[in-house]
Structure formats: C-alpha cells, structure tokens
Amino acid sequence: MKRNLISRCFILLTALTILSCAAGKDTSKNALFKTRKGEQKYINAYNKSLRLWPVPYTEQDIPTTFGTVHAVISGPVNAEPLVLLHGMDASSTMWYLNVKDYSKNYRVYAIDYIMEAGKSSLKENRNLNSDEIVQLYNETFDGLKLTNINLLGTSRGGWIATLYAIHHKERIKKLALLAPVQTFKMISMNSDLINAANFKIAPTRNRLKKLVHDFSLYPEKIDPIVKDQIYFGNKYTKTKLDLFSMTPFSDDELKSLDLPVLVLVGDHDILSPITIIEIAAEKIPNSHGAVIETAGHFLTVDRAEEVDKRVLEFLSEK
C-alpha cells in the first residue's frame, strides 16, 4: 500500500515535470525555473531572507560540470571549514538561526543544492544520479579549495553528506547528520507526507502552512520572510520530487565510515524515526547519537540552541 502511494506520487510528479517543460520555452538561465521573471521573484525573496543572517557574509559562485554552485560564507578566514548542506527546499538561508554559533570558530560554507530553488544554477533540468552528486561536490570543494572538512547536513542534506563521506572519507574530518532522511531506513508514507507531496505538486500558502506545522513543533520561530522564499521556490520552479530516488545506504557502506559521525533526531520527527540512532550506533564504528526532546523534523528551528551546542561539542572533541 505504501509503495503504491509512493509510486503514484512519483508518476504524477514526473508527468507534471514533462508538461511544464513542454508548455513553452524556458527563458531562465537556471533550468529549474519556469521563467526568468519567476526566478527573479524568487531571488528577491532569497535576498530578503539573507537580511536575517546575523553575521557578516560573502557570496561565491563555483562553476561545475552541472552548473554554478552558490555558497554563503561566514566566519574567520583561516578557521577550520564547516560545510552546511540544507534540507529540501530550504536553501542555505535556513541556517540563519544557527550560523552565528557556527561561525565563531569555523569558516562556514552554506551551499545551495543545485537541483532545488536557490542561487545555484542548474544547466539542464534533470535529476543527478549518486555518482554525479558526488562529482558535483568534489568540484565544489575543489573550487572552494577545501580539505579536512567538517560536514554538517540536515534532512536531505544529511543523505547527501553521508553519500559524499562514503565516497571521499579522506576529505572529511567529521560528519554531523541532523534528522537525515532515507539514510538509515526508508521513510514511511503517511498522510503528513502526502500533504508535503501535495505542496510540491500544487503549492499554495495553506499547504505550506500545513507542511510547516507538520514538520515543526514551533512553526512560529520560522520568519515569514523565509516562508515566502520557500513558497516562491516551489511556485516558480518545475515540479521535482526526487526524494524516493534516494535509498538507504547498505550495511557495508555505513561500516566503511570510520570517521567520527554524529546523528541527532527529534522525538517528534515524522520523517526520521528515533530508531535511526540505534541503527547508526550498530552500523557506524565511531557513531555518536542523541534524541532531541520536544523537537520535530526541523531540528535547527525547534531546538536551535541545543542542537548547535551538541554539534559544536562534537566538532571540538579530539
């Protein structure tokens, strides 16, 4: 039953993507956006969200095989690198609640995922496979001249961070995963996830409100400016939901992670069950895990102070 629901959602989204591409010539340089006008509305919303960034920052574009990758950079120039990979549809601006803590002692690089709305720009509107995603981040880190990276990913970003670390452990110092989806086990399709899929298919303000309330115990903590950005990011881009092409990693892949790994999950998370802490402890040789109380899937919102403290303590451990 659950797999049938997943298959139906995937088929519908694929059909909508084809229709949107066939509707007319895309005038935007970013293949994700339907029109240049829609892209500009989104970029304006992104820039408004960046006004919430509590510390000085610079922005940098990195050319890659698949398009241009955008990074928002803060913190001491010569400090250890900390790379942040955001959750689905959130873009790098989601870290505005956390970057002040992280940038005190780290050079922070918040990177927009190239296959979602953000300032990264995709050349061709298609899904990248796992090998291409690894190549994308290799080229990005080369462009930024990063080695010995502390890598932090949340939700979908956690899956991407794990994928990259499995293939290039030599480049990663420590790996921190916040409510990583599809990483240790498949998500369970339920009514809340169907609501989230409906927002992707046909975004409305009411559906966004429902999604935020499903994923966060404290939705009022999310600034309305950021909610606007998320809404525009779905409204003006071609429908894409590749979550189900992300599959959990094998036991051998997880066991190969011999670097320190932190896994945090909220006790009210509807996507990442608390059992992933046990799975990580069993499969990953040097795993550290904890359940964050009174927190939903949006860990960096619901319990920002607690999560930041745990992440920074993990990174500072010798």
Image (tube, grey):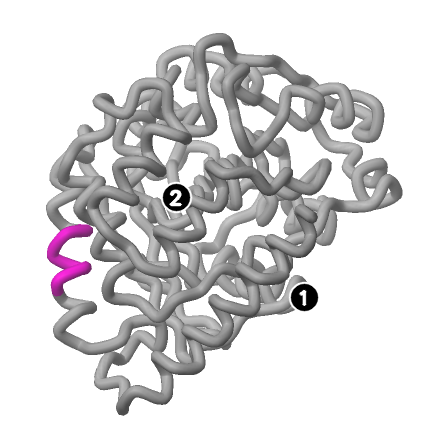
Residue ID at (25%, 61%): 235
Residue 43 magenta-highlighted: yes
Give neighbour class at mark 2: few <14, some 14-19, many 20+ (Cα, 10 Å).
Answer: many
Q: Nearer the viewer, mark 2 or mark 1?
A: 1
Query: In the figure, 20 relative to 194: above or below?
Result: below
Residue kind at label 1, given as amino acid type: Asp
What residue do we see at 31% from left, 38% from top? 94
Question: Mark 1 falls on what kind of element?
Answer: helix
Q: How many marks?
A: 2
**Residue farthest along the front direction in this orientation:** 1
Q: Is residue 147 left or right of residue 63?
A: right
| Element on which disc 2 rests | strand
Q: Quadrant of residue 131?
A: bottom right
- Please give the label number shown on residue 24: none
Disc 2 to disc 1, C-alpha distance: 22 Å
Which of the pair 186/201 is nearer the observer? 201
The answer to if 108 sits in the magenta stretch is no
The residue singled out by tag 2 in the image is 109
Q: Is residue 232 above or below residue 20?
A: above
Q: What stretch is highlighted in magenta?
A: 41-46
| Residue 200 versus residue 267 in the image, above or below | below
Q: Residue 283: x percent and y percent?
A: 83, 30
N-term-proximal mark, 2 vs 1:
2
Residue bearing the label numbered 1: 131
Q: Where is residue 16 in the image (x, y as percent from the top left)?
A: 42, 73
Is residue 170 shown to the viewer in this render?
Answer: no
Q: Can residue 6 be seen in this view?
A: yes
Identify the residue shown where x is 57% and y is 21%.
264
Percent x, y of residue 117: 32, 59
